[in-house]
Amino acid sequence: MKLTYLILITMFTIGNTSCHSQNKKNMQEQNNPLLCDPESGVCEIQTNKTSSANSSFLKANKKTIKIIYYTDPICSSCWGIEPQLRKLKLEYGNTIEIEYRMGGLLKDWSYNSGGISKPSDVANHWDEVSLYYDMPIDGDVWLEDPLMSSYPPSIAFKAAQVQDNEKAIKFLREIREMVFLQKKNITKWEYLELAANEVGLDIVKFKTDYEGKAKELFEEDLKLGRELGVRGFPTMFFTDTTGHKEMVYGSKPYNVFENALLKLFPNASKTSYDKTWSALFSKYASLTAKEFSELAGADRTESEKYLDNLTANGQLEKLTTKNGAMWTKKITRR
């Protein structure tokens, strides 16, 4: 069971993992493509290439700082950093440009190592990391309608990105909410189409790109990831206009992401923003209690009580899962 837990942690979380050296040795001997490093507290994907990408490609050109963000739609650690990422956008949006890249966390279930050979092995793990990251995740999707790969939703994101980058980011949020909270198998076209509709994408073009161009773009992301030495998710490369680089690897507190930015641009000015509930929900269509607490600068427990009061007053709607909740602004229908 212990080895099973370690492999699961390796597969679906990056950072803050407790392992033992002997277990690490065992996993290496099994030639598992995913390794857990107990000394650094992060989990890694083996790669043979490191930082061979064209440096001019990495430089910031639209804004002072460029962030290349390697992620995956079913990465629980990536879901775990949504509060920090949203705050970074609000405070330093005038300074940073974020380039989302897909990393390909789960190609298929063709391997069998350490007792992890089927999706149902992941269910309990997702429930555990939900508590750790204080973000709602329901692992029962792996029991009720399991995903065979993270490639289809990754390709779908690239198809959305072809049309509109901001809509693509909203699309990614939609499918993450589907898989983490609603237990939807986001490899299925019906859910991808539903999410695309929700964010206002042209569905005909979306489907055409999903079946064609997006696959090539996804392969390009994978290739660049290998060249950059991406070992897992989330990975963020912060670069300035000269190509100097800082990397944040794994799920980290907000100040770690902020400090990476400030190392490259010490004079970056922090933008003040409206922290009222109505302003935050106007900016982001959905918020968890952890996200609201982070963005509003409020106590976590008090934040949840506050959101519940707004729900009781009919101003918000609440989606409750067995491992937490998410709130959305109530839509008044005429």
Image (tube, grey):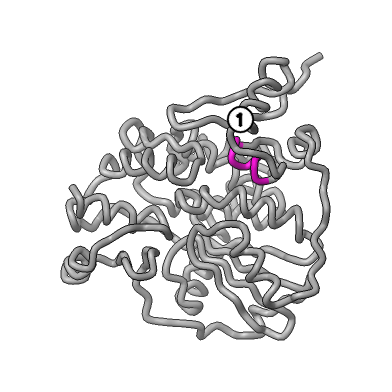
Tell me what residue is drawn at x 66 percent, y 27 percent.
307
Is residue 25 toward the left or the right of residue 13 in the image?
left
Q: Is residue 56 left or right of residue 180?
A: right
Magenta-colored stretch includes residue 293: yes
Quadrant including the C terminus? top right
Q: Residue at x 32, y 58 (%)?
A: 18
Q: Quadrant of residue 151?
A: bottom left
- Taking 146 as reference, is 241 above or below it? below
Q: Going 52% across and 55% down the picture, which residue do you hit? A: 155
Residue, disc 1: 304
Q: In the figure, is residue 97 to the left or right of 195? A: right
- x and y, in percent, of residue 219 in the image: 49, 67
Residue 66, how many percent across, how many down? 69, 71
* Residue 78, magenta (yes or no): no
- Circle 1: element type: helix
At which x and y percent is residue 306? Answer: 67, 27
Residue toward you, 103 or 213: 103
The image shows residue 200 at horizontal and vertical percentages of 71, 40
Depth check: give the residue in front, 131 or 236.
Answer: 131
Q: Amino acid at mark 1?
A: Glu
Q: Is residue 149 above or below residue 43?
A: above
The magenta-colored residue range is 288-294
Mark 1 crowd level (few <14, some 14–19, many ≥20, 10 Å Cα): many
Residue in the picture at 70% in, 44% down: 297
**Magenta-colored segment: predominant secondary structure:** helix
